Amino acid sequence: MEAVNPLLLSPALIREVEMEVVFGTPSKNCDGAGVCLLTNRLPRTRQIPCPHAPAIIHYPPGRELIFRFRKRYLDSRILDTYFNDERFLVEEAFRFPLPLARQWQLPVRWIKPGLYMLEEYTQEYRLYFPF
């Protein structure tokens, strides 16, 4: 059996985290299109009125942020409003959490308004935010 390089398993190289994505536009109190807020996962008992879903956020160094949304966590309201096209509209810039931006050494902390590529797979959607 071949030995595994311990550096390959280093936590410093893991650039993936699960967060709660609150949809909408920050200045419109979560109405509108885009991402209103990224936060730690919410307990199932905690209810908030804004549309939200968990996402696995991945950053391959030197590439783009990839948000992976598992379909089983997306209700019909979220699907119809935010995942009904090949592009995901962000009406207003949103901020990536500072501790994570520093840890991952992201080149920017704000995601600009615009249209971003959205891909549908069998069990998930992938949303790409290039730098």
Image: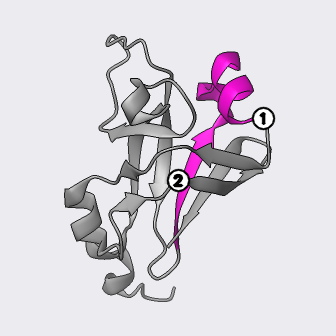
Label 2: how many Cα within 10 Å (few below 14, some 14–19, many 20+): some
> The residue tagged with tag 2: helix, strand or loop?
loop
Residue drawn at (39%, 66%) of the image: 15
Q: Is residue 79 above or below residue 123?
A: above
> The residue tagged with tag 1: helix, strand or loop?
loop
Residue 69, image x and y in percent? 59, 41
Tell whether 29 sits left or right of 92: left
Residue 104: name its quadrant.
bottom left
Residue 58, image x and y in percent? 48, 61
- The alpha-carbon separation of the residues under discs 1 and 2 comes to 18 Å
Colouring method of the image: one colour
Q: Tell which circle, 1 or 2, labels the residue nearer the N-terminal end.
A: 1
Q: Nearer the viewer, residue 109 or 120?
A: 109
Tell me the tag on residue 84.
Answer: 1
- Decide whether residue 123 is among the magenta residues: no
What residue span does the magenta drawing correspond to?
64-84
Residue drawn at (46%, 67%) of the image: 59
Tell whether 97 sits left or right of 128: left
Residue 27, image x and y in percent? 38, 32
Q: Amino acid at mark 1?
A: Asn
Q: Which residue is mark 2?
A: 113
- Decide whether residue 65 is among the magenta residues: yes
Residue drawn at (37%, 68%) of the image: 14
